[in-house]
Image: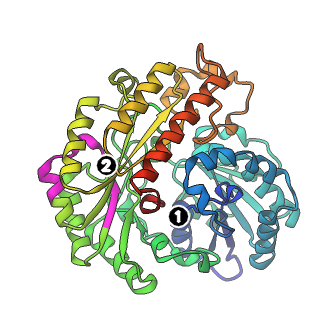
Amino acid sequence: MNNQTKKKVLLVDPPFHAFFEYDRWWFSYACAQIAACLRENDIEAYVYDADKYFKKDPATQNRDEMVKRQPLYEEGVKNDNHHIWKHFRETLDKINPDIVGVTTWTSKMQSTFKILEICKEFNPEMKTCVGGYHASARPEDFKDNPLIDTIFTGPAEFTMVEWIVNGCKEKLVAGNPRSVDVTKLPPPSRESLLYPEHYTPSDMSMIMTSRGCPYDCTFCSNKLITGRKYQMRTVDQVKEEIEHIINKYNIKSLDLTDANFLVNIKKSLEMAKLFKSFDLTWGTACRIDIITEEILEKLINYGCSYLSFGIETGTNAGMKILNKKITVEQVYRASEILKKYKIRWKCFFIVGFPHETLEDMETTRRFALSLGASYISLNSFAPLPGTEIYNTYKSTFDGLSTEIHEYNQLSPKATFLRGISPEQYREKFLSILRDFDNYNNSVKATEDFHGI
């Protein structure tokens, strides 16, 4: 691309947590990955990671506090004079991009449209585009919107480069979720992140060794971008990236973004051995049914300091409905091994699934508190378009009086539960959440696991 046609691109991850003063600990990986592909093709690219640049309140480490602050998002989005929007306007003036691309998530829809509105006010001739999960699941939500020039569905690392090189003409650019070869991707461009003073070495330690997950949990949106294609980067690629972030950012540990690190145990252990060669501690997410004493010993010997597991529910019937392909008994067996080896471990739970009763939620509470985990996390079920569970209850979700974007994991609405009023559900959710917060505080895990 010659200098006459060279474009300047601003990739935006819209604000959400910033309105709650929550310390969201990672950098915008998807935007930094696309920025790397653009820069590799001589296209100037910057990332505006809106949840990183503003005041953080330690009180939000308790998830109960995050529920209380939910109204601040809707109020903040509508406040044209909010300091967050003033900061974005200042950034537009500073960068003066030709193209702004916004990554979308269902719960961030309001701030996505506000970002686009500000962009078109700043420069009506600017090209604007949206991509990411929600654009892939429901491109119709953006169709014919005068604020949006182009919609990207599926992975956009390569399709966005082609779109820019070809003159930004297409209105809809569809990427095949199974088309991307991660070994052909450059590492994410941390250097493209604006306002680097807001990032710590811990933030920069986030790294991906594998992409995708071959499992098919009914509530998971991962497959809309990856098509359930699981693939790993090469050891040499990961080695080069680790060397870079050690030298430039002085990182002391690694936080893996992998959705499921131990799919290919042999290759994953080769990666773990690589981490050990740098004398780095690290942590990751994996399936709890894979845990054996032999595997855990190897992980710990290679420097693994924590593991995270999606358990979701406390009943075997619920696990079957969610297609988790694990059982309560398997979780208990793994928990005993994890406690025996004294490794830190975090488990995630969700309540409010459409099939659940108050008794099911109570069972999940008791189950989670009985495991002896280092940290337990609770989310409220949020219907995500394009997932199997959404499609199963589509008539229910499409008929909700509340807009779908008003649901998120800490906004316990759940107006779709049968025989349970919204008030009953909210009371039950908050009761379980407070028990989990109290448990985490009692084992002094909140600080340790903030950011994990």
Using the image, determine if residue 85 lies above or below residue 134: below
Residue 290 painted magenta = yes
Total numbered badges shown on the rendered structure: 2
The image quadrant where one finds the C terminus is bottom left
In terms of image quadrants, where is residue 145? top right
Give the residue at the far bottom of this rendering: 247
Q: Residue at x 70, y 76 (%)?
A: 5
Q: Is residue 313 visible?
A: no
Structural crowding at the residue carrying mark 1, measured as other residues with C-alpha within 10 Å and reported as few (<14), some (14–19) or many (≥20): some
Residue placed most toward the observer, 108 or 66: 66
**Residues shaded magenta:** 282-297
Mark 2 against mark 1, which lies toward the viewer? 1
Chosen colour scheme: rainbow
Counting from the top left corner in percent of width and height, residue 175 is at 53, 49
Q: Circle 2 sits on which residue?
A: 286
Q: Residue at x 37, y 75 (%)?
A: 241
Using the image, determine if residue 157 lies above or below residue 309: below
- At label 2, which amino acid type do we have? Cys
Structural crowding at the residue carrying mark 2, measured as other residues with C-alpha within 10 Å and reported as few (<14), some (14–19) or many (≥20): some
The image quadrant where one finds the N terminus is bottom right
Q: Residue at x 55, y 28 (%)?
A: 390
Counting from the top left corner in percent of width and height, residue 191 is at 54, 79
Under circle 1, the secondary element is loop
Residue 21 painted magenta = no
Q: Circle 1 sits on which residue?
A: 25
